[in-house]
Image: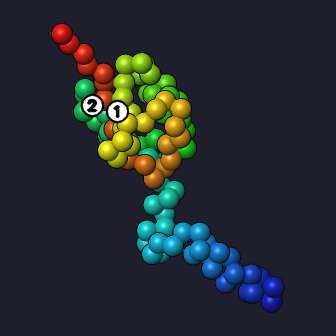
Amino acid sequence: MLISSVLRPLKRSLVDLEYPLPLGRRNAYHLPMQVQLNHPSRSIEIKGPKRAKDLLRELNLLVEAHLVIRGDELVTEDEMLSDKDEIEIRPVISGG
């Protein structure tokens, strides 16, 4: 019992170093990534981490016909996406 009472505070302090967020926000790291799809417009949650091309395949979308955007940056198909990312997927539209 004495050892477990010593280890519990130690484990908490290691978690605090790894996740320096307020206690109420710590679970944000364990939430799925938010994915915003257009045409039709909808929002879904997907568990990460995964590569952008794997995300598109999971959603039955062609890699060559869609753009993956994290924040304000275009993501290549081999980049890893994590649970904390907010992703937008747009279809490629061309005209002439």
Is residue 10 visible in the rendered image? The answer is yes
* Residue 50 point in image, percent of width and height: 55, 38
Instruction: Label 2, secondary structure: give it.
Output: loop
* Residue 93 point in image, percent of width and height: 25, 19
Name the mark on residue 76.
Answer: none
Relative side of 39 to 35, left or right: left
Q: Nearer the viewer, residue 82 or 60?
A: 82
Instruction: Label 1, secondary structure: give it.
Output: strand
Q: Residue at x 25, y 27 (%)?
A: 40
Give the residue number, with chain letter if any, for mark 2. 38
User: Is residue 37 shown above or below 6?
Assistant: above
Nearest to N terminus: mark 1 or mark 2: 2
Name the mark on residue 89.
Answer: 1
If the image is split into quadrants, where does the N terminus sit?
bottom right
How many C-alpha atoms fall within 10 Å of the one at disc 2: few (<14), some, or many (≥20)? few
Q: Residue at x 36, y 29 (%)?
A: 67
